[in-house]
Amino acid sequence: TARGVAVRRARIVSTPVSEYIRFEHAVTDGLNIAAGEDVRWLSRRRVTAVALPGNDFWLFDSSLVLLNHFDGEGENMDMELTEDPEVAKLCESAFEAVWTRATPHAEFELS
């Protein structure tokens, strides 16, 4: 962000939230927000109409996607980079749909 790059992070969470999500929410101000990220939260119940990719991802410059592959316990098993234009298009569309529905960090209340 110091270079003028916008970093937006959207977190989709199940409610009621887990203890880990409570921890993640508590440290977001001091880590993510302090680093210049714009963070929003969205209850999983509000994404029914959004076509989401099957994996967690980071999208860079609308063209490079870093996919995170997790196991059943939430441990990261593998990461995959792709420049497939269809994957990037799906990820960008999904992210923007989530972003418009999500609540800014400072306003998001844990349940």
Image (cartoon, helix red, strand yellow):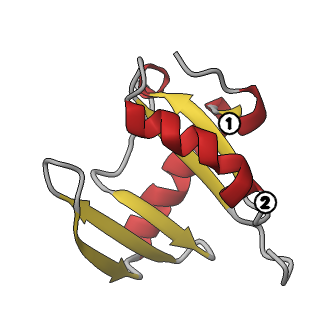
Name the spot of residue 61 as percent of width and height, x first: 63, 76
Disc 1 vs disc 2: Cβ atoms closer than 8 Å?
Answer: no
Apparent side of residue 87 relative to residue 28 in the rendered image (left or right): left
How far apart marks 1 and 2 lie (CA) works out to: 22 Å
Apparent side of residue 66 relative to residue 96 in the rendered image (left or right): left
Apparent side of residue 24 relative to residue 15 in the rendered image (left or right): right
Q: Residues within 10 Å of mark 2 (few under 14, many from 20)?
A: few
Residue 16's place in the image compared with 35, above or below, is above
Residue 63's place in the image compared with 6, above or below, is below
Question: Which of 83/67 is in front?
Answer: 67
Quadrant, the N terminus: bottom right
Q: In this view of the protein, can residue 86 be seen by the observer? A: no
Question: Which of 85/69 is in front?
Answer: 69
- The nearer-to-camera label among 1 and 2 is 2
Q: Callout 1, which amino acid?
A: Thr
Residue indicated by mark 2: 34
Q: Secondary structure at mark 2?
A: loop
Residue displayed at 73% across by 36% down: 104
Quadrant of the rendered image containing residue 87: bottom left
Question: Which of 3/92 is in front?
Answer: 3
Residue indicated by mark 1: 100
Quadrant of the rendered image containing residue 82: bottom left
Q: Residue furthest left?
A: 72
Q: Callout 2, which amino acid?
A: Ala
Residue displayed at 43% across by 56% down: 90
First in residue order: circle 1 vs circle 2? 2
Residue displayed at 37% across by 56% down: 56
Q: In this view of the protein, can residue 50 be seen by the observer? A: yes
